[in-house]
Structure formats: structure tokens, C-alpha cells
Amino acid sequence: MAQRGGKVHMVCRNPQSGQEAKDEIQAAAQTGDVRLHHLDLSVPRDVLRFAREFVLSEPSLDCLVNNAGCMINTREVKVWGGFFFLQKLCC
């Protein structure tokens, strides 16, 4: 998407690995607008805040790609956390 000049918003829990992925995408694409957002999807309050800010700052969301990573830690559920809460709010 970035190679075709699209604006890409990456939502990542880990800022360091997110920045590494963003740098890799920008180096490969050499065009486009890649933005990194730090967000823990297991915290609904933060997801709602991010979704509200996104809707106010962006004219549209044309494509949503969910890329779940590998879970190597013990699963934790925080205050009615849902994995697809962000998708539901933005679409």
C-alpha cells in the first residue's frame, strides 16, 4: 500500500518494534505516508480514544488490515477488552 503512494497507519503495542517495522516499510516503499501509532488494543478506553481521534483527523478509512502477532505470553484480559473493538469503531 505504501509503495502505491497510500497513507498507511500502523497501530502497534510495542513502540520499538513498531518503529522498526515502519522504517522497513518506508525503506522498501520509498514513497507514501507511513504513520505509527502506539496503542494497546486490550485497553478499551485507549482504543476508544484512538478511534475518536482517528475519525476526527482522517477523511476516510479505505482499507483495514488486521495482523495479529504471535502470543508467547500468558493471555491477559483487561476491562472487557476485545480484539476487534477498534475495527468496529472505525468502520
Image (cartoon, rainbow, N blue to C red):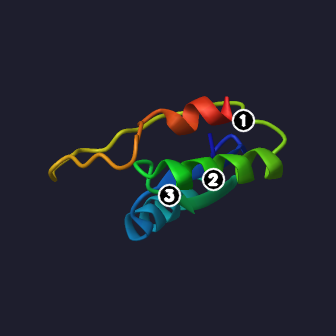
Count neighbours of disc 1 (C-alpha within 10 A) and say few if under 14, some if 14 to 19, many if 20 or more.
few
The first of marks 3 and 2 along the sequence is 3
Given the image, on which type of amino acid does mark 1 rest? Leu
**Element at label 3:** loop
Mark 3 highlights which residue?
Answer: 39
**Residue at the outermost right position:** 59
Is residue 24 found left or right of 5 in the rendered image? left
Q: Earlier in the sequence, mark 1 or mark 2?
A: 2
Disc 1 is placed on an element classified as loop
Q: Quadrant of the C terminus?
A: top right
Task: Look at mark 2 in the image and give the residue it sits on.
Answer: 50
Query: Do labels 3 and 2 touch, CB within 8 Å?
Result: yes
15 w.r.t. 57: above or below: below
Amino acid tagged 3: Leu
Residue 61 marker:
1
Q: In front of the other: label 1 or label 3? A: 3
Q: Residue at x 44, y 68 (%)?
A: 15
At label 2, the amino acid type is: Phe
Name which residue lies at 50% across and 57% down: 39
Q: Is residue 27 visible?
A: yes
Quadrant for residue 21, please give it.
bottom left
Q: For the residues marked 1 and 2, what is the alpha-carbon distance in whole angstroms?
A: 14 Å
- Assess disc 2: are there few (<14), some (14-19) or many (≥20) residues with their C-alpha within 10 Å of its C-alpha: many
**CA distance for labels 1 and 3:** 18 Å
- Callout 3 crowding tier (Cα within 10 Å): few <14, some 14–19, many ≥20: some
